[in-house]
Image (cartoon, rainbow, N blue to C red):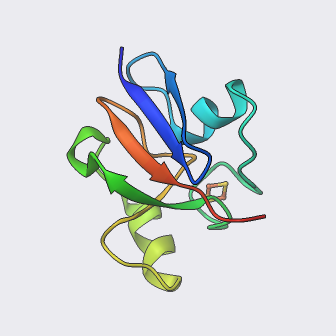
Amino acid sequence: MPKVTFMPLGQSFEVDDGTTILVAAIRNGVKLRHDCTEAICGTDKVKILAGQNNLSPMDDNEELTLSMLESDDADRLGCVAKVLGDVIVEIPAE
Ligand code: FES
């Protein structure tokens, strides 16, 4: 099973293939703000520190939302980015 590591917490969790970063966080008690879960609000923007290629490709909504935020290539939206292999994810400070 793929492993998601949340930074700066340094906690790792195994998840089912295809689990979104947001669901991985919620199921494991990691707080990640999420106001829409549809790749629209951008509140769950996270930075991928490693394993970018182990995530599902961006869909149009995610690409558009990230382009409207101050984002770089390492940023993804937790509600739609699906984990397909090991990733290290930096979550925003509350
Ligand atoms: S929760 Fe709104 S973009 Fe992910």
| Count of numbered tags | 0
Q: Dividing the picture into quarters, in which one does residue 27 lie? A: top right
Q: Quadrant of the N terminus?
A: top left
Quarter of the figure with residue 44:
bottom right
**Residue 93 location, x and y as percent?**
71, 65
Name the residue rendered at 45%, 15% in the picture: 16
Q: Does 16 appear above or below 93? A: above
**Residue 80, position in %: x, y?**
50, 46
Horizontal side of 39 relative to 18 (left or right) equals right
Quadrant of the image where one finds ligand 1: bottom right
Can you give x and y, in whole percent of width and height, for residue 69 in the image?
53, 82
Residue at 46% from the left image edge and 50% from the top image edge: 89
Query: What x and y, as percent, mark residue 36?
Result: 72, 54
Residue at the image point whose x is 48% and y is 19% from the top: 15
The quadrant holding residue 45 is bottom right
Which residue is found at the position 77% from the left and 57% from the top?
Answer: 35
Furthest residue in direction left, as rendered? 53
Q: Where 5 sits versus 72, above or below? A: above
Lateral position of residue 88 relative to residue 10, left or right: left
Quadrant housing the C terminus: bottom right
